[in-house]
Image (spheres, helix red, strand yellow):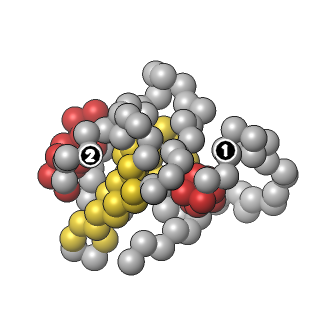
């Protein structure tokens, strides 16, 4: 089952994806175009050209999950991405909003929140 938390790394493929691809084909995109390991626990998001289909690829517990979302009406918003950045990182909150149809462009400005500083590694 997909569980979104703040520790989960999420990457969006910024090009239109071929939705005929399954786990092996999407893993090939992750390896070839992202230069990443699809088994590292990250969540990889792919959307088709018409922006009405989405696939999420996630490796967990010794196997792959492939989630498939088909919109009966409407489309997924085009993410405000930079063309030279592929994959585009997003966080769990942004993915939840995107899946719910909330505009990420309108909600781009975030209010200030406290963040614990990371501990310095002493060698």
Outermost residue on the front side: it is: 73
Place of residue 72 in the rendered image (x, y in percent of width and height, measured from the top left): 45, 56
Q: Which residue is tagged 1?
A: 104
- Left/right of residue 39 with respect to residue 49 in the rendered view: left
Place of residue 105 in the rendered image (x, y in percent of width and height, measured from the top left): 69, 38
* Helix, strand or loop for disc 1: loop
Which of disc 2 and disc 1 is earlier in sequence? 2
Question: Is 112 situated above or below 2?
Answer: above
Q: Residue at x 27, y 53 (%)?
A: 38
- Count of numbered circles in the view: 2
Place of residue 107 in the rendered image (x, y in percent of width and height, measured from the top left): 75, 45
Single out the mark in the foreground, 1 or 2: 2
Which of these two is toward me, 23 or 30?
23
Res 83 label: none
Using the rendered image of the protein, determine whether residue 121 is visible from the camera's viewpoint.
Answer: no
The crowding category of the residue bearing disc 2, from other C-alpha atoms within 10 Å (few below 14, some 14 to 19, many at least 20), is some
Using the rendered image of the protein, determine whether residue 98 is visible from the camera's viewpoint.
Answer: yes
The crowding category of the residue bearing disc 1, from other C-alpha atoms within 10 Å (few below 14, some 14 to 19, many at least 20), is some
Q: Residue at x 84, y 51 (%)?
A: 111
Q: Residue at x 39, y 51 (%)?
A: 54
- Quadrant, the N terminus: bottom left
Q: Residue at x 38, y 34 (%)?
A: 49
Q: Which residue is tagged 2?
A: 19
Compute the Cα span from label 1 to label 2. 23 Å
């Amino acid at each position: 089952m997909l569980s979104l938390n703040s520790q989960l790394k999420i990457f969006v493929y910024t090009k239109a994806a071929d939705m005929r691809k399954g786990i092996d084909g999407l893993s090939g995109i992750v390896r070839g175009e992202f230069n990443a390991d699809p088994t590292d626990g990250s969540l990889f998001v792919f959307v088709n050209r018409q922006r009405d289909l989405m696939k999420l690829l996630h490796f967990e517990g010794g196997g792959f999950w492939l989630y498939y979302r088909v919109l009966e009406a409407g489309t997924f918003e085009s993410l405000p991405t930079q063309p030279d950045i592929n994959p585009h990182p997003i966080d769990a909150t942004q993915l939840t909003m995107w899946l719910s149809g909330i505009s990420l462009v309108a909600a781009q400005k975030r209010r200030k929140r406290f963040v614990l500083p990371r501990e310095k590694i002493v060698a």
